[in-house]
Image: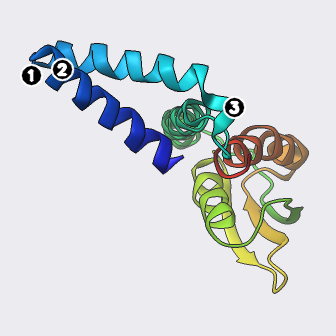
């Protein structure tokens, strides 16, 4: 992915030099032409085409920002409620992610989910113990984590 991005940037700078236009618009035109050339020749690259990974990173960043806003409003709603009707508890969550960066990203995103907090990671790094503010919603939280966070992280880190 990094090689393809650097090649696209190099093509954009070569385009700028060839047409003697050292402006942002000249760079953008060169970048788009380089992207078009690389699209036509993508079967010669051993790795997947890099705009897919870039798009996956943008979607993961969008998910992070969305969860920050949702969790903030959820906490505010719990604070201003006159009567608390919560039943907190701890549940185990089995993850399919690899240890390392994928698991670290999941743990960070999971802590942003409204009403959840990661307590511990098992020794095999496949089971996460999570505190939930409302155990009646634990299955919904588990489904939400699997369908949003894990899916987005796998799109970024795996081919």
Q: Residue at x 19, y 15 (%)?
A: 26
Q: Is mark 2 on a helix, strand or loop?
A: helix
42 over 119 or under it: above or below: above
Mark 3–mark 1 Cα distance, whole angstroms, equals 31 Å
Q: Which residue is drawn at 54% across and 43% down?
A: 75
144 over 110 or under it: above or below: above
> Percent x, y for residue 104?
62, 66
Picture colour scheme: rainbow
Residue identifier under label 2: 18
> Percent x, y for residue 110?
65, 54
Mark 3–mark 2 Cα distance, whole angstroms, equals 27 Å
Residue 16: quarter of image: top left
Pick whichever, 68 or 62, lies toward us: 62
Pick whichever, 24 or 148, lies toward us: 24
**Label 2: how many Cα within 10 Å (few below 14, some 14–19, many 20+):** few
Residue identifier under label 3: 43
């Amino acid at each position: 992915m990094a090689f393809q991005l650097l090649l696209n940037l190099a093509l954009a700078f070569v385009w700028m030099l060839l047409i003697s236009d050292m402006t942002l618009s000249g760079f953008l035109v060169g970048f788009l032409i380089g992207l078009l050339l690389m699209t036509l020749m993508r079967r010669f690259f051993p790795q997947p085409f890099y705009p897919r990974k870039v798009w996956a990173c943008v979607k993961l960043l969008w998910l992070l920002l969305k969860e920050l806003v949702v969790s903030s409003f959820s906490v505010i709603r719990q604070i201003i409620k006159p009567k608390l009707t919560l039943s907190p508890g701890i549940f185990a969550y089995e993850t399919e992610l690899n240890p390392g960066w994928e698991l670290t990203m999941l743990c960070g995103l999971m802590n942003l989910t409204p009403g959840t907090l990661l307590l511990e990671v098992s020794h095999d790094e496949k089971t996460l113990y999570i505190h939930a503010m409302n155990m009646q919603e634990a299955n919904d939280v588990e489904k939400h984590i699997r369908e949003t966070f894990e899916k987005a992280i796998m799109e970024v880190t795996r081919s």
